């Protein structure tokens, strides 16, 4: 692609220079007029940036080289369609790698570039305005663009948003036949769809269509907001969900679905819209029973591993689960504070280990005795790949293994998301501790909504063992979020 700038005192002179230097297939990329404050002390001049493909410039150069210099200027004073036809008819250009049976005489950019003849229709009050800027965006005017080699005229009024749609329709409507006249005045007709890809027009048309459609969409949305204000129920729901910290993408999805499924009258009712939103949000919180609850004592041992990155009430959760499953073995990996008093009160069997090998050995012995095992595994300093290999090894060795990520309701949403993303590939669900101290249920809802493949299993609601534990439900999260009884 060759790109050049041309300057002239008028639009006609600039177009003639472009036609002479680049040919009739050139396309205009940008037009600048020295006007206003910038050009107040300069003579008005037109600056046009034009371009032509390497293929078309080569075809034009062949004609220029074969033509005497005296006749060249006269040749380019003819119409664009005549010049384009003569370039195509040149002997060196007839068979330039294309099959003549499928050749269609059509310029590459003729209908989008210099083949546009500009006509300004001025009203009575602005009869003296003739500059290019007046043509492009002058108040009180209406400009029309005449397209050569097109069967109809296309009018573009850039002041009216509706004309964007007309412009798009005009571009998309490719003629199924092309009629033109050669230098002798005889009529030629080509039937069939023109090969836009071969002539380099497909990309230009697509870019122009996309740009106009984007502008039309923005204008339509702006007009719609002005003409149709948002219903009071939708507006109040949007404001409430944002204040609760719900993710913007989730808010937009809920609003869009409510607008589609509910009537206009229902979207005005705050109670109806909130009831609908609660049902939708409840469906986004996935819960499930722990797998060890479905295993009978006769079926053998089951291994449950609580996984976290730091202290989050995981040890208390381990004791509560051990109290639920009588006769189970609790294993603490790299233990911290000792809770021997709790162990004695509830008769819990606890082993404290310092390595992964000791965990595997203890689980194997418990499996032989038919005991279920709960493992407190906090990944303080272990590499992530080592942890994943350890979990995969447990599953291969013992079969029935459930991994639950332990999150704390008092940790930030960002931290909980990081932990969930890290262990999502090896986990079967999540447990949430310290729910009684949660200040931002919206952050907890966002985690549940984002990781629906990790259902909630348990909620820890305090420090008392074994009372402060309950099966996870979506209603519990929504009740805390909206302060419901």
Image (cartoon, rainbow, N blue to C red):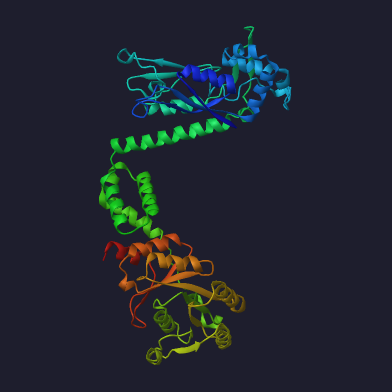
Expressed as whole percent of the image width and height from the top left, the position of residue 385 reads: 57, 72
Vertical position of residue 119 compared to residue 235: above or below: above
- Between 208 and 72, the residue placed more toward the observer is 72
- Compared to residue 75, the image places residue 265 above or below, namely below
| Quadrant of the drawing holding the N terminus | top right
Residue 115 in view (yes/no): no
The percent position of residue 299, horizontal first and vertical second, equals 55, 80
Nearer-the-camera pick, 129 or 481? 129
Name which quarter of the figure residue 192 lies in: top right
- Residue 357: which quarter of the image? bottom right
Relative height, residue 218 to residue 93 (above, below): below
Q: Residue at 39% across / 50% down in the picture?
A: 253
Name the one closer to the observer, 231 or 443.
443
The quarter of the displayed image where residue 475 is located: bottom left
The correct choice, above or below, for 313 with respect to 91 in the image is below
Q: Is residue 392 left or right of residue 292?
A: right
């Amino acid at each position: 692609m060759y790109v050049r700038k041309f300057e002239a005192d008028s639009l006609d002179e600039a177009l003639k220079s472009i036609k002479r230097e680049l040919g009739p297939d050139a396309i205009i990329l940008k037009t600048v007029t020295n006007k206003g404050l910038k050009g107040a002390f300069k003579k008005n001049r037109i600056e046009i940036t034009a371009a032509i493909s390497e293929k078309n410039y080569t075809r034009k150069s062949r004609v220029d080289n074969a033509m005497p210099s005296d006749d060249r200027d006269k040749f380019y004073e003819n119409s664009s369609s005549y010049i384009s036809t003569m370039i195509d008819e040149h002997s060196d250009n007839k068979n330039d790698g294309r099959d003549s049976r499928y050749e269609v005489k059509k310029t590459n950019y003729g209908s989008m570039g210099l083949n546009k003849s500009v006509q300004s229709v001025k009203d009575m009050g602005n009869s003296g305005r003739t500059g290019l800027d007046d043509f492009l965006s002058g108040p009180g005017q209406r400009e029309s663009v005449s397209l050569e080699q097109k069967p109809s005229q296309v009018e573009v009024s850039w002041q009216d948003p509706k004309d964007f749609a007309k412009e798009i329709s005009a571009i998309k409507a490719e003629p199924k036949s092309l009629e033109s006249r050669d230098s002798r005045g005889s009529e030629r007709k080509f039937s069939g769809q023109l090969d836009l890809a071969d002539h380099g027009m497909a990309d230009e048309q697509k870019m122009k269509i996309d740009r106009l459609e984007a502008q039309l969409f923005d204008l339509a949305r702006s007009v719609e907001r002005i003409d149709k204000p948002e219903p009071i129920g939708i507006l109040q729901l949007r404001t409430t969900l944002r204040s609760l910290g719900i993710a913007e993408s989730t808010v937009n999805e809920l609003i869009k679905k409510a607008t589609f499924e509910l009537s206009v009258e229902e979207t005005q009712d705050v109670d109806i819209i909130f009831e609908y939103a609660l049902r939708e949000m409840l469906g986004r919180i996935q819960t499930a029973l722990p797998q060890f609850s479905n295993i009978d004592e006769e079926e053998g041992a089951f291994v449950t591993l609580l996984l976290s990155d730091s202290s989050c009430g995981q040890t208390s959760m381990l004791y509560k689960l051990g109290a639920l499953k009588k006769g189970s073995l609790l294993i603490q990996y790299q233990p911290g504070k000792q809770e021997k008093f709790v162990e004695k009160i509830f008769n819990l069997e606890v082993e404290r280990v310092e390595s992964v090998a000791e965990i595997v050995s203890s689980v194997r012995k418990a499996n032989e005795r038919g005991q279920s095992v709960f493992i407190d595994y906090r990944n303080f300093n272990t590499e992530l790949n080592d942890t994943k290999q350890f979990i995969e090894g447990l599953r291969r060795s013992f079969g029935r293994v459930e991994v639950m990520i332990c999150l704390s309701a008092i940790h930030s949403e960002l931290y909980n998301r990081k932990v969930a993303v890290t262990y999502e590939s090896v986990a079967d669900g999540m447990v949430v501790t310290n729910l009684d101290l949660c200040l931002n249920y919206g952050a907890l809802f966002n985690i549940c909504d984002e990781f629906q493949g990790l259902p909630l299993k348990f909620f820890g609601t305090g420090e008392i063992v074994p009372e402060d534990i309950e099966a996870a439900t979506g209603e519990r999260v929504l009740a805390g979020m909206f302060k419901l009884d």
